[in-house]
Structures are given as structure tokens and as C-alpha cells.
Amino acid sequence: MLSVHNLNKTYYFGKNEEQVLKDVSINFPSGKATALLGPSGSGKSTLLNIIGGLDNAYEGEVCLFGQCLNRKNMKFYDSYRLNQIGFVFQSFYLLEQQTVYENIRLGLMPLKLSAQETQARIEAVLQQVDLSDFAQVRANLLSGGQKQRVAIARALVKNPTIIIADEPTGALDGETAAQILSLLLSFKEDGKIVIIVTHDEDIAKQCDYIARIQDGQILQSPPDDQLTKQLTWKKPQFSWGRSGVLIGRNLWQRKTRNAVMAGFASIGIVSLILTTSLGVGAQLYLENQVDREFNPKEVVITTTDRSEKIDANFINELQADERVERVETAYPIILTQVMYEEVLAGGSPVISVPELTANQAERMNIISGELPASDQLELALQEDYALKLVEDPETLLGKTVTLMASGYREDAQPVQIEAVVTGIFGEPKDENGRSFDSGPRSANGVNYVTSLALNQEIIDQSSGVDNEELEYRVYTAEIDPAKEIAALARDEGYRAVAVADVIGTINQLFDGIRIVLTSIGFISVFVAGMMIGIVMYISVIERTTEIGLMRALGYRRFDIGRIFLGESVAIGFITGFAGCLVAYLLSFGLNVGFYDLIGFNIVQIPWTSFAGALLIAMTMGLLGGIIPAIIAARKDPVIALRTE
Ligand code: ADP
Ligand code: MG
């Protein structure tokens, strides 16, 4: 038996108060159906909510087979609703977009049951309410009577001790109402307590007892019974996996809205990925350009005054320095012309070529012949220049050409040297084998290479110019040490030029740009997070009765909050995923578009950017969803389920 003793319940609105239940004492015998009759507003629903453990703000006692509800323990109420109470409402509260099966499963989910047992129970209860053929039908396609049968099945599937039906037939026609009533009455065996609120005297007559309430006072109560019953209590067990099932279902149900929102929200993510990686791409591009034209691991050390020399001890020191790979003497001589005996029809026997530099073999792209030896008077010619001398550059291989350098001999004539062509090289290629169509690549003499011996010969022939010990080139293994070496040389009073210094400046510039762009990205992500929060909040409002229903079914606050938070994080994840996809496609397009222009992938998205974007998007969902989830969790089920 369920017994209520001296129950008082008062509602407060501001300063006004209304005592809805006045010293209510009533019995609901087990194995019997009791009809609760009373005019509208007399306190029937209020009483049922208290009996059903939805409301614990009252004075008095509610005892089930002698065991009274412990008002201090919230968890106990969740467990009580889950294990002992099956609610049936006038307005069904089905999840309209979900199937009959899924609606019934909702009542069972918080219980720890195996998949087989879950399915067996749902099938059994479907049979009881005669809806076996409707398991996979969506609830919104059912008639009122069928809907109420689903609601009854959802209440009964967990095998509760008490069935509380608050005007279960109020929305149904006479015949359907009779069917529902007989269905409800069929559950009173086995010591179960059936309580049916109704206005209908005919329905009341079919119950075993009639209880009457008016103005919050009991006019008639069923008799006491001394029956006892062994109650089963299972711990609520709403796992992460099961909340995942509901989260997925809920997201799918509002798929259009969620997709649109994720689409909008992903703009922030896309901009975040692109701005950061565009920065990276452009920076790499510039570094690459610098790297191609100038060696960033090279430091050129000269004296500030050309009449002075660089101290050999300092050079020795550098050579001993472990940061330094090698030190080369440089020959700052300009080669101006190459002459070849055979004259092409209409061509010129003389071509001008840029600066003569030390051997830069590692940058050469020899297409025929080979690199000149460093100890021979040999050279390799760039193809374009060779074509000015002969029709077929290969015919130059092994031939002797005359070089005229701009150094001066004692007789005031230009330096002239004969050298053998050993190789022809093409344009420098990038790692993908593509030529560079832009950039000042000829500036440092990559068009022309010659051997050290050739350089030395020019120096030897040049009079009055003692180039040695005037300029050294120091090569380091890494870029940063190059800066350090340059600083060291400057400290010694020399002039030192290191491209690494320039790269540092470029990096600083890009860091600045990136900070600005990233902040913009973060702001848009923040806005997107707010958007998710607002949409989740709207969702909470829309689903208030769903929340109330779930609480009535025995879900805990935590379960409700977790579902909403989970949805929000999942939307964040989808947003992030969409953002990554869009960013990837955009980067692909940008790279294809820009490649011809600059010969370089302008956007380079590292995988960490994608991972970071996903993480940020999920955090965004988490932060956006926290407040709505808390609001959802704290919704008062009594108010949520109130229908006037
Ligand atoms: P019944 O179900 O018998 O029609 P209720 O139990 O729903 O009656 O309501 C009893 C009285 O309590 C009514 O006057 C109603 O206005 C009031 N009431 C019910 N719920 C609330 C609430 N959440 N806040 C304030 N008053 C309420
Ligand atoms: Mg009511």
C-alpha cells in the first residue's frame, strides 16, 4: 500500500501563498485500482507529483509499503521514480519524431539491462498494449489511443510498483477511453498499485476504490491494507554509451537546423585554420625564396675598410667553432663576358654573364656534362647563355671559351682566361621539378658556375688587387648559428651580412600578422560558440516537456545535463569537422590557383592545425553548451509537465 500522511503543500508566488494540499492523508491499496476524483484545481496533479517523487517540497510523509520517502536525498527520488513509478499523462508526451520502439526504450534506458533483455522487455510490453506491428512506426503517425498505449508501455516496461495516470483518457473519445482504462486496470495484479485521476464517474466506477479530493482536502479515502511487497531497487545506470545513442538521435532529429548552424559556425573555424596556415604558407614561401636566392646558413664577413685585412686568427677561431661547417675565401670579382670562336648566323660571339661566384654545386641542375672540377680551369654554362653562343649547347662540352673579367692587369687590359666547358645546367628547379618563373634568382650567380681554380686564376692575373683575406664566407649547419656567427664577427669589428638576420625579421613580421589574424579567427569562433549556446538554449526551451518526461521516467539531472552538453559538444565536433573539410578544399583551390603564379603552395595546413581546430570547435561546443545544459538539468519537472 502507498499511504500519505498529513501532507501539506503550499505554493508561493511572491508574497501570496496558496495552500494546495491541506493535511492530506490517503491510502492507495496494492493490487487495486483507485480512481482519484475531484474538480479541476483541487490539487489532484499536485498530489500525484508528490506521490510520484517528482516534487519533494512538501510537509508530511509518503510511504510505500511502510518505507517512507527520504526527502533529504535527491538521488533517492530519482531511484524511486525509476524503480517504482510509472507515469501516464493526459497528453502522452511522446517523442513525436521517434518510433514507438524508441519511445518505449526511453523508459528503460536508465536501467542496467543487457541489449537482449531490453529488446525482450520492449517486445513483451508491445504485445501487452497490442502494438507489436507498430514498433517501427513514428509516433506522430499514431492515433490518440495508440499514442496513449505507447505511453503506457513506456511506463510499464520497467515494471514499476505504482502506475500513476493523470487524466489518461482526457484527450480520448469514449470508446478509446474504455480500452485505455481496461488496459490500465489489467496491471493491478501482482500487488501493483494503480492510481487513475479522472473526471468521469463511469470510469471511476470501474476502479476498485474511489478517492475524492476537493480544495486540497480528502473527502474519501480507500481503506488501509496491511499488505507488504518485496520491492526491487536497481541503481540508475545511464551510461555514456546510452546517452550517446540519445544524443545521436536528437541531433539527427534536428539535422537541418544543426547542419545550418554547424555551417555558419564553421566559418570561424575555417578562418582560424586558413589564417594561421596562410601565414605559415606565405612565410614558408618567402623563406623559401630567400633560401633559394641566398643561403641563410651563410655569413659573409668583410672588413669595414677595404685596405684592412681579416685577422687569420679570427678565421682560425671560426674554423674551430663547432657551429661552423666550413669557411671559404671569397673572390669578389665580376665576370662580364664569355667569347667563343664560332659565330652563329646573326648571333654574337660575346655574351655577358653575371657575377662569378665560388662553386655552388649544390644548387646546380646539370642537364648535360658535369660540374667543373675545383682545381681545373673549367666552367659550366647556363643553358640560356650557351644558346647565345651555339645552337646546340651540348656541342660546347669540352670546348674552350674565353672569359673576360673586370679585373685589371698591369698593362691595364682586362683579365682574359681560357677555360673548358664541362657542363650545361638548366634553370634551378624546385622540389617538384618545376622551374621558377619569378624572383631575382640570377642575382647571386646561379646562372653561372665556375671552379675555384678559375677564380684563383682571375685573381692571380689581376694586378694590384689582393683579394685574399678580404672576404670570407662562413657556412653553418643551421640558420640560428649563422646569426650568432654574424654577431660575433660584428663584435670583432668586421662587417657581417647574414641572410638569417633578414629571415628573423620576416618571421617577426609574420608572427605579428598571424597574431592579428588568429585573434580574428578566435573572435569568430567565440561568436560561433555563443551561437551554439543560443541554439542549445532554444532547444532546451522547445524540449522542456521532453526534459520533464525524462525526469518523470527516472533520469537524473546529471543525465539530462549530459545529453544537452553532449549534443553541444557533438555540434562543435561537426562544426570543426566541416571547418576542416572546407579549409582543406579551400587550401587546395588556393594552392592550385597560386601555384602558377609563385610556384609554391601558398596554404600549407599542418595536421596539427586540423587537430587543433577540432579541439577548439569541441571546446567551443562545450563552453557554448554548459549554461543551456545546466538550465536543462535544473528544469523543475513539475512545471515542465504542467498543462493547464
Ligand atoms: P488539478 O490537477 O486537480 O486540476 P493541480 O494540482 O494542478 O489541480 O493544481 C492545484 C492548485 O495549485 C491550482 O490552484 C493551481 O493553480 C495551483 N498550482 C499548481 N501548480 C502550481 C505551481 N507550479 N505554482 C503555483 N501554483 C500552482
Ligand atoms: Mg491536473
Image (cartoon, rainbow, N blue to C red):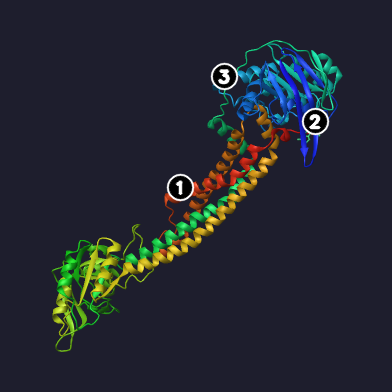
Q: Secondary structure at mark 2?
A: strand
Q: Quadrant of residue 556?
A: top right
* Residue displayed at 39% across by 64% down: 507
Q: In this image, 494 relative to 143: left or right? A: left
Quick check: which quadrant has ligand 2?
top right
Q: Nearer the viewer, residue 254 or 533?
A: 533
Q: Amino acid at mark 3?
A: Glu
Residue 147 visible in the displayed image: no
Q: Which residue is mark 2?
A: 20
Q: In the picture provided, is 493 more to the left or to the right than 47?
A: left
Instruction: Give percent across and percent down for residue 137.
Output: 68, 27
Residue 641 image-quadrant placement: top right
Q: Nearer the viewer, mark 3 or mark 2?
A: 2
Q: Label 2 sits on what residue type?
A: Val
Q: Say if disc 2 is inside 8 Å of ligand 1.
A: yes
> Do we see residue 178 in this rendering?
yes
Question: In the image, is residue 118 above or below residue 491?
Answer: above
**Marking on residue 553:** none
- Report the Cα–Cα distance between label 3 and label 2: 42 Å
Say few, some or many: other residues with alpha carbon within 10 Å of mark 2 (under 14 / 14 to 19 / 20 or more): many
The crowding category of the residue bearing disc 1, from other C-alpha atoms within 10 Å (few below 14, some 14 to 19, many at least 20), is some
User: Of marks 2 and 1, which one's residue comes earlier in the chain?
Assistant: 2
Q: Quadrant of residue 428?
A: bottom left
Q: Quadrant of the C terminus?
A: top right
Q: Mark 3 = which residue?
A: 117
The front one of 377 and 310 is: 310
**What is the x, y in percent for residue 217?**
82, 24
Image quadrant occupied by the N terminus: top right
Q: Are marks 2 and 1 in contact (CB under 8 Å)?
A: no
Q: Residue at x 73, y 11 (%)?
A: 225
Q: Residues within 10 Å of mark 3 (few under 14, many from 20)?
A: few
Residue 611, numbered label: 1
